[in-house]
Image (cartoon, rainbow, N blue to C red):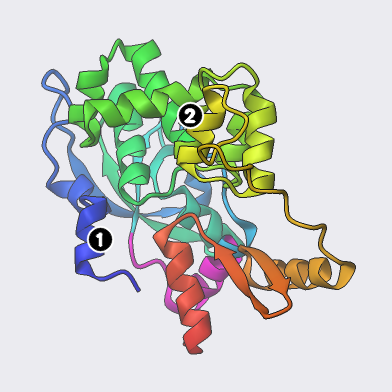
Amino acid sequence: MADDASRKRLGRGLAALIGEMDQPVEEAPEPQASDRILPIEFVVRNPNNPRREFSENELEDLAASIREHGIIQPVVVREQPGNGGVYELIAGERRWRAAQRAGLTEIPVIIRNVDDKVALELAIIENVQRADLNPIEEAAGYQKLIDEYSYTQADLGDVIGKSRSHVANTLRLLKLPRQVQSMVGNGELSAGHARALVTAPDPEGLARRIVDEGLSVRQAETLAQGNPTPEGGNEAKRAPKEKDADTLALEKLLTDQLGLRVEIAHGKNGGELKVRYKTLDQLDALCHRLQGV
């Protein structure tokens, strides 16, 4: 569904990474690339891939597409250091996982001759540009480059194609308690809400209140500053009434069918249905289903 303008706003795609992207850092050797078909068992996952979450429904949909059309876009790999003949993924783990489910015995690859640092850069860039990383995964990837390769926030901004302030704000999320990070990672809490809680005295309690009461980022910032009435003097929005069993069952049914979180709010004069998505790929798949494509 996303048009060309939307894709451009997300930045350069994987195709640009493969053959047209400038050197990630000045001192890095220029990567060389070649195209091949490899037995799928010769390709292994990269333990440093910043992306950790893979939707089961998305993998099944992609596997079905691969069974019918094959893999249109090759994955990007490098020869695994110290293990000749085995190749480690740099980008395309979701396609690799789906290809295994589809029963493929071979997979198209683009081989790049890069070191650990450049491989991590490319993995982060590919996922960030495709909006595949949740904010916590993105922050963890940035932190790994800082810890292992002495990057500054300005260096990261140049390499990733983001502003220094974006990098700094993303890294702040790692200061939150593990439970709040989990809420950000699974989409319960937005990065904007979470950043407001970094210096709050009880970030976990406030995070749960934000989710339960559906508070805005501005309201979350007011709460984090110690004001118990986030709407500027008016009483805070009350938590919604507990949903009945039928509504909860319908939400679960729709969530299972779509593979996306569905929420239903019903009242005397009607209601609303919300479908939450994390990536443009999820939105595209939903639109295709609604259009019967």
Query: Is residue 179 rendered to the left or right of residue 246?
Result: left
Percent position of residue 173, x then y: 48, 26
Q: As displayed, is residue 270 above or below residue 175?
A: below
Residue at the image position 40 percent from the left and 66 percent from the top? 71
> Is residue 82 at all visible to an observer of this figure?
no
Bin the neighbour count of mark 1 within 10 Å (Cα to Cα): few under 14, some 14-19, many 20 and up.
Answer: some
Q: As displayed, is residue 45 above or below residue 27?
A: below
Mark 2: which amino acid? Answer: Ala
Task: Mark 1 and mark 2 in contact? Answer it, CB < 8 Å.
Answer: no
> Is residue 33 at all visible to an observer of this figure?
yes
Residues in magenta? 59-73
Residue 139 figure quarter: top left
Residue at the image position 21 percent from the left and 47 percent from the top? 18
Rounded to the nearest angstrom, the CA distance separating label 1 from label 2 is: 29 Å
Element at label 1: helix
Residue 61 lies in magenta, yes or no? yes
- Which residue in the rendered view is the most extreme toward the right? 245
